Image (tube, rainbow, N blue to C red):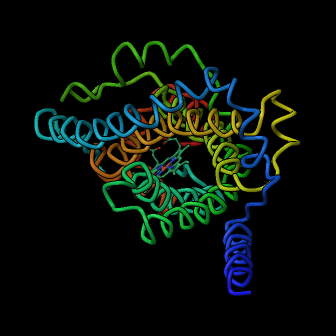
């Protein structure tokens, strides 16, 4: 009788733990399906284990050490660009644009540090802190998702490649020189376009791959069938893609914030009141300025 009680309690405890974790013995990640996946380990399992175990955290560590050093060098050797904010102002960003931009910014300010905590989860001892960051990361993803479509709709027409972009790239946008001179660029320069295409469509990829990982204990058969993989393979690919795109986005986000807050003095004003100084537009977006002048808009 005592034995039966112990066995029943153990079974009950196991069932409760499994259901608390959202795991059932027939879940596509566990039970017999896990064994069926063993022969597929070579396909995505080997690169996933190598990257997740040894490479990703080192690459992220490199990024968070190298980029602040690069920015500090740029700031102290070449210096920030300053433009007169006394003269005329040019209206650049509508209220709607600024609102959705700040929603995206708020989301990223949460996404990046919480993402990094997960990358260095072992360092933080795993557990409740890392789990809370994971949940916060998911909440911020929803906030970010709200901004994606409006930003695309409002900006995409100015984000396609143009002739100026090659000239801009060849002179590195004038950012490696102290001299003030006209830089060939439309409303957005090549660097800003690259940021847009990485952050926004790349953001979609991050949302999708992030969702697959967040809901890993759910039955994702529909999606794994869609991609012609098993659920474990879908998760491994999602984790690899999420980390690789994540690195690219984190680098570009750091650059974007450095440019907006430090490299161009007063740039942040354009995202607060929607205006840029005439001198900044005339020099840094000279082709657009000429167009506006021709149309009599400045
Ligand atoms: C704390 C975070 C952020 C700050 C301080 C910031 C600041 C700014 C500023 C000042 C501008 C105007 C730059 C100019 O045209 O001279 C700008 C533009 C822009 N921002 Fe942000 N931003 C942030 C986060 C984000 C995020 C998370 C996204 C998208 C996911 C984003 C996407 C853009 C885009 C597409 C533009 C127009 C192109 C460009 O100027 O790069 N920003 N941002």
Residue 97 lies, with reference to residue 259, above or below; the image says: below
**Residue 41 shows up from this direction:** yes
Q: Tell which of 41 and 108 is nearer to you.
A: 41
Q: Where is residue 127 in the image (x, y as percent from the top left)?
A: 44, 67
Q: Tell which of 193 and 163 is nearer to you.
A: 193
How many numbered discs?
0
Q: Which residue is drawn at 49% across and 25% down?
A: 190
| Quarter of the view holding residue 102 | bottom right
Q: Which residue lies furthest to the front in this view?
A: 1
Q: Position of residue 253 (x, y in %)?
A: 43, 44
Q: Where is residue 122 in the image (x, y as percent from the top left)?
A: 36, 54
Q: Is residue 47 left or right of residue 43?
A: left
Q: Residue at x 76, y 33 (%)?
A: 36
Q: Where is residue 3 in the image (x, y as percent from the top left)?
A: 69, 80
Q: Which residue is drawn at 11% across and 34% down?
A: 77
**Residue 288 shows up from this direction:** no
Q: Which residue lies furthest to the left in this view?
A: 77
On-image quarter of the N terminus: bottom right
Residue 141 lies, with reference to residue 237, above or below; the image says: below
Q: Tell which of 82 and 43 is nearer to you.
A: 43
Q: Tell which of 41 and 222 is nearer to you.
A: 41
Residue 122 lies, with reference to residue 38, above or below; the image says: below
Residue 62 lies, with reference to residue 126, above or below; the image says: above
């Amino acid at each position: 009788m005592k034995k039966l009680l112990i066995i029943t309690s153990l079974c009950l405890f196991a069932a409760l733990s499994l259901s608390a974790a959202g795991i059932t013995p027939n879940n596509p990640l566990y039970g017999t399906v896990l064994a069926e996946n063993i022969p597929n380990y070579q396909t995505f399992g080997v690169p996933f284990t190598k990257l997740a175990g040894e490479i990703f955290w080192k690459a992220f560590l490199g990024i968070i050490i190298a980029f602040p050093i690069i920015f500090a060098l740029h700031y102290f050797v070449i210096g920030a660009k300053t433009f007169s904010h006394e003269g005329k102002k040019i209206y650049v960003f509508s209220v709607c644009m600024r609102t959705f931009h700040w929603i995206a910014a708020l989301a990223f300010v949460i996404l990046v540090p919480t993402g990094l905590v997960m990358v260095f989860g072992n360092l933080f001892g795993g557990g409740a802190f890392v789990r809370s960051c994971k949940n916060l990361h998911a909440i911020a993803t929803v906030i970010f998702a709200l901004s994606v479509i409006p930003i695309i709709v409002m900006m995409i027409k100015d984000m396609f490649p143009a002739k100026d972009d090659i000239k801009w790239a060849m002179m590195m946008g004038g950012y490696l020189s102290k001299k003030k001179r006209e830089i060939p660029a439309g409303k957005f320069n090549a660097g800003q376009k690259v940021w847009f295409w990485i952050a926004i469509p790349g953001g979609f990829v991050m949302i999708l791959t992030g969702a697959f990982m967040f809901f890993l204990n759910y039955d994702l058969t529909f999606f794994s069938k869609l991609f012609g993989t098993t659920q474990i393979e879908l998760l491994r690919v999602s984790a690899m893609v999420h980390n690789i795109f994540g690195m690219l986005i984190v680098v570009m986000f750091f650059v974007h914030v450095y440019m907006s807050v430090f490299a161009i003095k007063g740039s942040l004003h354009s995202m607060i009141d929607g205006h840029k100084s005439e001198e900044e537009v005339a020099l840094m977006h000279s082709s657009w300025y000429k167009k506006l002048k021709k149309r009599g808009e400045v």
